[in-house]
Image: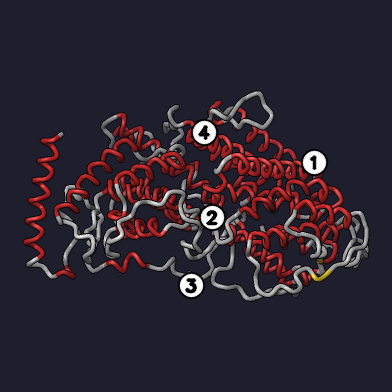
């Protein structure tokens, strides 16, 4: 080891001597990055970064689109647009949309959230121009690799972690020697960038881990992304290779956790198309372009990870799959036993393709609802979950099994799989909640949708009470939460007599989670935009709220007041959102707004408006939709808002 370090020191001294000579000859503004670094041996898609290019670290968020972005039927943003169109037909118009209207922010780095759980020991004298990798030390980098492995790598093992850690040790040994010898002057301008493939992979993984720890926001994570952005952009213009696919998938993961699901969908779609260019969707390719079993296995895992993520983000955005099942060779090998989560998610995604045809295909939507079809799809999803290996099976509260011995990663995977089962079941049954008529004709299916949604809320609530998984993975679990809330709203709006009291407990569980969100978290801002769409039309629909003298921050007192109101006792009321100037986007404000909407919906259907008297005759159990006759206009509003 001593001889190795001495040899390394001699190499550093030689590099320093050569670089010092070059610095005397080359204009400082035109100097390329450290191409002589032993970690820059392979740079097929690099754009040199000059010493004066520090401004790249201060780039703003995504440029606002010139045209509205498409969102499909499974997404919330698409449905919000349809809702506004329905309102315009009714003569009800809200405020003008701002540049960030919708459920996703245009800026991929929204308002700051609390600092990471562990702040890295960053050098104070580092110049802003430097490559962000110089802001890390070896121990912090290795720790963050393990964070990524625990949070993402166990699900999508596309990176050889042992190899990456070995590279990290070598890289930081070199960097420490460069600091000591003066090869890298921390306080002087100049990027001193290190651009090789493995280091770029390290930067992306660390950026994802920092973003996870920062609840969606990390300045250092953003700087690390800026360092590799040019390389990612160039991948699409070069011949495809496995390393490029890996980098695209990591970039997609990063943007997903920055709450930019559409960009994650786009990057994964690019990776899927390049994978097909390589022929990874055909079984014979693996014997012709890969020489070892290890390479073939790694490529197999990478392809199926792309397949699963393509499905995942297509459902989230409502946009089509890049990989169609009909184009994939049925003889193509599936992931093997060492990757149980990925194996299970491949089967889940294939079932998801069938559900997609049911809920997103225009022809299928025009067809009458079929109880048999919904029941069979539900049966298939339930069977999928029953056949999961024990390591992925959810341990329900009160069972004889003890989950205290489970690792954090094991708990997350089990809960994740259970919530995904419920997610797909909700997508199957949710169409029956789109109108009071549909509910009355399909009451069994409507009750099933509500029970599954309530179950999801209970699971997420219990997870939040016993672990920190919800706080660290808000992007993933909040999708399940909002989807379940949408079901409760639809059910109570269209059939309050059947569902109002039945949904109340789980509704307030969800509100506790909303209140628990950080006030400045991008996730709470995202949910607020959903609430705002309903909030703006509330007064125009005549919906009123409870007396504010009651402690609205207490879900139990709010529930008690609501029950009195639903029982028919007159109560003093004020305008639903009277006295509110501007948008109250605090967690308590969002929770109170959700409370008002939920209770008003129940009272509207029960004929209790204002001081307890019916303002709409002939409700007949039709819920809110009856206020607009039999055209179910509000059915469209509530359906499409979610």
In terms of secondary structure, where does tag 4 sit?
A: helix
In-front residue for pair 289/156: 156
Can you see residue 351?
no
How many residues crowd around disc 1 within 10 Å: few (fewer than 14), some, or many (20 or more)? few
In terms of secondary structure, where does tag 3 sit?
A: loop
* Whole-number angstrom distance, CA of label 3 to CA of label 2: 19 Å
In-front residue for pair 545/301: 545
Percent x, y of residue 7: 10, 41
Residue 444's disc number? 1
Query: Residue at horizontal 33%, vertical 37%?
Result: 160
How many residues crowd around disc 2 within 10 Å: few (fewer than 14), some, or many (20 or more)? many
Residue 66's disc number? 3
Residue 410's disc number? 4
In the rendered structure, which disc, 4 or 1, sits on the residue that comes first in sequence?
Answer: 4
* Whole-number angstrom distance, CA of label 3 to CA of label 1: 45 Å
Percent x, y of residue 558: 79, 56
- Asked whether, in this view, residue 289 is left or right of residue 534, the answer is left
Query: Residue at horizontal 60%, vertical 39%?
Result: 466
Q: Nearer the viewer, mark 3 or mark 2?
A: 3
Q: Nearer the viewer, mark 4 or mark 2?
A: 4
Assign the C terminus to one quadrant of the image: bottom right
């Amino acid at each position: 080891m001593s001889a190795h370090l001495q040899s390394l020191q001699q190499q550093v001294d030689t590099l320093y001597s050569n670089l010092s000579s070059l610095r005397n000859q080359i204009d400082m503004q035109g100097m390329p990055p450290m191409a002589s670094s032993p970690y820059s041996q392979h740079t097929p898609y690099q754009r040199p970064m000059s010493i004066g290019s520090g401004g790249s670290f201060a780039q703003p968020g995504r440029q606002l689109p010139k045209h509205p972005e498409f969102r499909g039927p499974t997404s919330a943003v698409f449905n919000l647009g349809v809702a506004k169109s329905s309102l315009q037909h009714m003569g009800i118009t809200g405020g003008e949309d701002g540049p960030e209207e919708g459920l996703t922010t245009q800026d991929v780095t929204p308002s700051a959230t609390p600092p990471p759980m562990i702040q890295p020991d960053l050098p104070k004298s580092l110049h802003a121009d430097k490559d962000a990798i110089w802001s890390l030390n070896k121990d912090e980098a290795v720790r963050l690799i393990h964070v990524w492995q625990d949070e993402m790598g166990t699900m999508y093992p596309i990176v050889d972690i042992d190899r990456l850690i070995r590279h990290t040790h070598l890289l930081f040994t070199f960097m420490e020697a460069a600091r000591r010898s003066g090869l890298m002057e921390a306080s002087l301008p100049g990027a001193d960038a290190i651009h090789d493939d493995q280091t770029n992979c390290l930067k992306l993984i660390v950026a994802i881990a920092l973003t996870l720890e920062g609840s969606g926001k990390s300045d250092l994570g953003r700087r690390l992304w800026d360092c590799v952005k040019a390389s990612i952009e160039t991948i699409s213009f070069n011949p495809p290779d496995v390393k490029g696919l890996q980098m695209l998938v990591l970039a997609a993961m990063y943007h997903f956790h920055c709450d930019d699901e559409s960009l994650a969908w786009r990057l994964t779609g690019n990776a899927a198309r390049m994978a097909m260019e390589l022929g990874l969707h055909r079984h014979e390719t693996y014997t012709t372009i890969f020489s070892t079993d290890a390479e073939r296995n790694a490529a197999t895992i990478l392809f199926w990870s792309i397949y699963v993520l393509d499905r995942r983000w297509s459902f989230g955005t409502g946009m089509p799959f890049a990989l169609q099942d009909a184009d994939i060779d049925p003889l193509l090998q599936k992931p093997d036993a060492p990757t149980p989560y990925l194996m299970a998610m491949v089967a889940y995604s294939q079932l998801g393709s069938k559900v997609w045809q049911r809920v997103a295909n225009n022809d299928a939507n025009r067809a009458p609802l079929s109880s048999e079809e919904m029941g069979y799809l539900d049966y298939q999803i339930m069977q999928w979950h029953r056949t999961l290996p024990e390591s992925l099976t959810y341990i329900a509260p009160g069972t004889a099994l003890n989950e205290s011995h489970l690792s954090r990663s094991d708990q997350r995977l089990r809960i994740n799989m259970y919530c995904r089962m419920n997610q797909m079941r909700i997508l199957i049954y949710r169409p029956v909640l789109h109108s009071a008529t549909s509910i009355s004709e399909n009451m069994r299916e409507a009750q099933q949708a509500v029970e599954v949604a309530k179950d999801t809320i209970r699971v997420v609530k219990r997870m939040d009470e016993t672990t920190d998984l919800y706080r660290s993975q808000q992007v993933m679990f909040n999708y399940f939460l909002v989807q379940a809330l949408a079901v409760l709203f639809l059910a109570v709006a269209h059939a309050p007599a059947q569902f109002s009291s039945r949904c109340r407990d789980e509704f307030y569980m969800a509100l506790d989670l909303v209140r628990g969100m950080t006030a400045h978290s991008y996730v709470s801002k995202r949910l607020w935009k959903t609430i705002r769409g309903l909030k703006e039309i509330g007064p125009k629909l005549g919906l009123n709220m409870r007396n504010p003298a009651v402690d609205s921050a207490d879900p139990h007192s709010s529930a008690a007041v609501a029950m009195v109101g639903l029982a028919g006792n007159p109560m003093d009321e004020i305008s639903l959102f009277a006295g509110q100037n501007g948008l109250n986007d605090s967690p308590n404000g969002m929770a109170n707004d959700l409370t008002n909407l939920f209770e008003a919906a129940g009272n509207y259907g029960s004929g209790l408006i204002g001081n307890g008297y019916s303002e709409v005759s002939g409700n007949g159990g039709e819920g809110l939709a009856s206020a607009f006759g039999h055209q179910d206009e509000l059915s469209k509003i509530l359906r499409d808002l979610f």
